[in-house]
Image: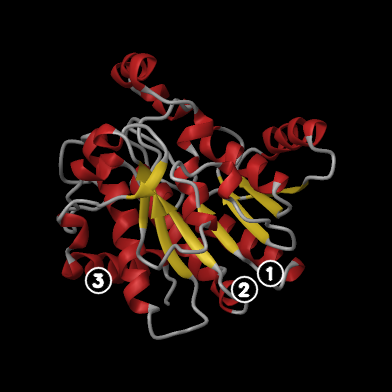
Amino acid sequence: MSKKWTHADIPDQTGKVIIITGATSGLGKEASKVLAEKGATVIMAVRNTEKGEKVIQEITKEHPKAKLEVKKLDLGSLKSIESFAKEFLQQYDQLNILINNAGVMMCPYAKTEDGFEIQMGTNHLGHFALTRKLMAALIQTKDSRVVATSSIGHRMGDIDFDDINWEKRKYDTNKAYGDSKLANLYFTYEGARKFSSNPNAPKMVAAHPGVTATDLDRHSKLLQFFNKFMAQGVEKGTLPTLRAATDPTAKSGDYFGPGGLFEARGYPKKVDSNALSKDIEKAQKLWKVSEQMTGVSF
């Protein structure tokens, strides 16, 4: 294993089936391209299927043998999650890797179709429900894994369980984003604990891209300005996700991010999250609340 972990370290993925949410741009698009190049069958789970088809054309132009498929998924709709999972399970009996990548960031206040605050609803609750709906395929696939995409922004989070949908407080979009990214870590760590006694359960791994230039910053002028000087390209920013998804030495509960100063950029390595993210009681509480809100049970 090279000291600087790169695409060259990704093992051959031939015969594997991988779902990537939010695969039409940024990290999801790049991960789809790289993993398809490595031989995997990549299911791009996206809201805009037309955009998804264009991405497939783009990738197959360069790599004609790439196996990619677009399926409709809106993580802000439990109904859409249900129908995506149903369609996938009818077509496939294996799922090697689920990369929960899609997300919204620092956007104006809104609610999902099911009444959840938009950032928690999309970034955490949608993926929570999706993972549960696909669990049968993950369990029957040897060495499967689930990758959650968190952020250094998890350090801004501290979930108010009495007002998870921000109906009682003045909306702070930055904090709401931090809450959702903290939730991604609670999900990974609690999942790793919960499934530790089941040898067939998927590994639960998390990653963050550091400061990477994607269109997620479209709602923040400050971030756009900052990114001009600080951000690394999407190719390098996707490496922590790819390592979390494919590194044979990764363990359940591991967290990968850039290895440079403040984890802002650099080659991926195992990183640490803040003390709050390791609060077992809060992680268990979020899991319980998530089951109640989404109506799914692990």
Q: Amino acid at mark 2?
A: Ala
Q: Secondary structure at mark 3?
A: helix
For marks 3 and 1, give the CA distance: 28 Å
Q: Secondary structure at mark 2?
A: helix
Query: Residue 204, relative to residue 126: is it above or below?
Result: below
Mark 1 / mark 2, whichever is N-terminal: 1
Q: Amino acid at mark 1?
A: Leu
Q: Residue at x 62, y 79 (%)?
A: 140
Q: Residue at x 54, y 73 (%)?
A: 135
Is residue 167 rendered to the left or right of residue 58? left
| Quarter residue 153 falls in | top left
Q: Say which residue label 1 marks.
A: 89
Image coords of residue 236 (percent x, y): 49, 33
Q: Amino acid at mark 3?
A: Gln
All told, the count of numbered labels is: 3
The residue carrying pointer 2 sits among few (fewer than 14), some (14 to 19) or many (20 or more) residues within 10 Å by Cα, namely: some
- Examine the rendering and report whether any part of residue 115 can be seen: no
Query: Residue 181, relative to residue 58: is it above or below?
Result: below
For marks 1 and 2, give the CA distance: 7 Å
Q: Secondary structure at mark 1?
A: helix
- Circles 3 and 1: CB atoms closer than 8 Å: no
Q: Say which residue label 2 marks.
A: 137
Mark 2 / mark 3, whichever is N-terminal: 2
Is residue 217 rendered to the left or right of residue 260? right
For marks 2 and 3, give the CA distance: 24 Å
- Circles 2 and 3: CB atoms closer than 8 Å: no
Of the 4 image quadrants, the one containing the C terminus is bottom left
Q: Say which residue label 3 marks.
A: 284
Image coords of residue 192 (percent x, y): 36, 71
Image coords of residue 3 (percent x, y): 43, 45
